[in-house]
Image (tube, rainbow, N blue to C red):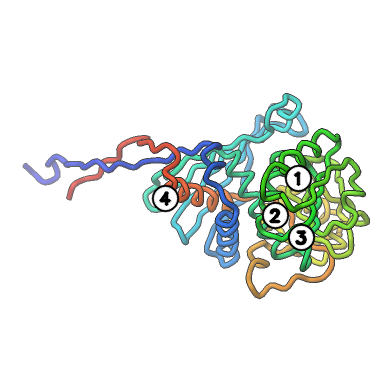
Amino acid sequence: MPPHLAPILYTRIDMTTVLLTGDDCARIAEWPGLMRAMREVHLEHARGDAVQPVPRSIRNPADTDAAPAQIIPMTGYRAATGSYVLKALADAPHNRERGIPAQRSTVALFSAETGECRALIDGAVLTRTRTAAVTAAATVALAPAGASIVTIVGAGALALEHARALVSALPLSEIRFWSRTPAGSDAAVATLAGEPEFARIALNATTDLRAALNGAEIVCTLTPARDPLISAHMLGENVHVNAVGSPPRPLFRELTPDVFGRAALTVVDALPIALAESGNIRDAVAAGTLAADEPLELGHVLVESFARPRGLTVFNSVGIGLQDLAAAEYFLERSEVHEDGLQVQLRPVRTPVS
């Protein structure tokens, strides 16, 4: 038989995918490892060893709403681990009026060499915890020395995760929660008061934003506000602000442009994405209080040689695919150690036998 007509023999290679639910992620998460994962991927990004494209959203062109539902494919590549990530983020702001989450997401982790889907992970807990871990890493680098009083503007699930991440990273003495209604901030305090990590920390709730900010050394804004909540005169002289709550579209903003005008340093997770998606940054650039090339990317301030300037510092985060990539790798590794999650074979792979 001519060689070109000979039958090709195949062998099966089983490629398994690990499925992780939000509950799986909550069981195996721990802050030091997650913060370390976020630090490492941002340092790699700063060195040029990781690729972070600007996401391009997809929406119904017939929807004329100012904040239409959209899906955002968040991607990234990491040379150190040979991995790609794709997070499909569905952002539907009007879900808040329906009493359901505004954002839903699923994270897929791929081998860059074989294309194997190594993990599929529900994005809710992954996103909340990686966001809080990034904020904590930034705060360690940017907060004034000895800072111990934190004000958290917001009282939802992301606010609680930020409190947990920060208390794991810094010797805090007080955490203040602000919300528009007493129910939100009171519930946040009640939840954390029952957790042993907060036994020696003063937890306070308020609806008075100016009082909450008075004397605060670290401020975290974690709201989907369309109108800015905080202006420069409301902040102390030597304070670090984490602006984290805005969804990834420019019509949301938490800080007025004069905050950036007063800041000694503005830091973002990835500058091209911040310029495309952050209402805070875009407004400040348009107002002339911040130059478009002025913000530093986070990886550049996480190096050991970085020295924090005195005065106001701001970390403005919109969330990026590389953070999801590092978090997915972290949770996959933890699931293997703890034998958690469900392993499935999505399809058999056949390769020719030589």
Residue 168 appears in the rendering = yes
Residue beneath disc 1 = 222
Q: Nearer the viewer, residue 49 or 99?
A: 99
Q: Which mark is residue 96?
A: none
Q: Which residue is mark 2?
A: 166
Residue shown at 86%/54% (left/top)? 257
Q: Residues within 10 Å of mark 4 (few under 14, many from 20)?
A: some
Say if 128 sits above or below 67 in the image.
below
Q: Which residue is mark 4?
A: 111
N-term-proximal mark, 3 vs 1? 1
Report the amino acid beneath label 3. Ala
Circles 3 and 4, Cβ within 8 Å, touching? The answer is: no
Which residue shows up at 72% across the image and 33% down it? 93
Kind of residue at disc 1? Leu
Would you say 38 lies left or right of 135 here?
left
> In 3D space, how far apart are the residues under numbered discs 1 and 2 (Cα atoms)?
14 Å
Q: Report if the CB atoms under discs 3 and 2 are less than 8 Å apart.
A: no
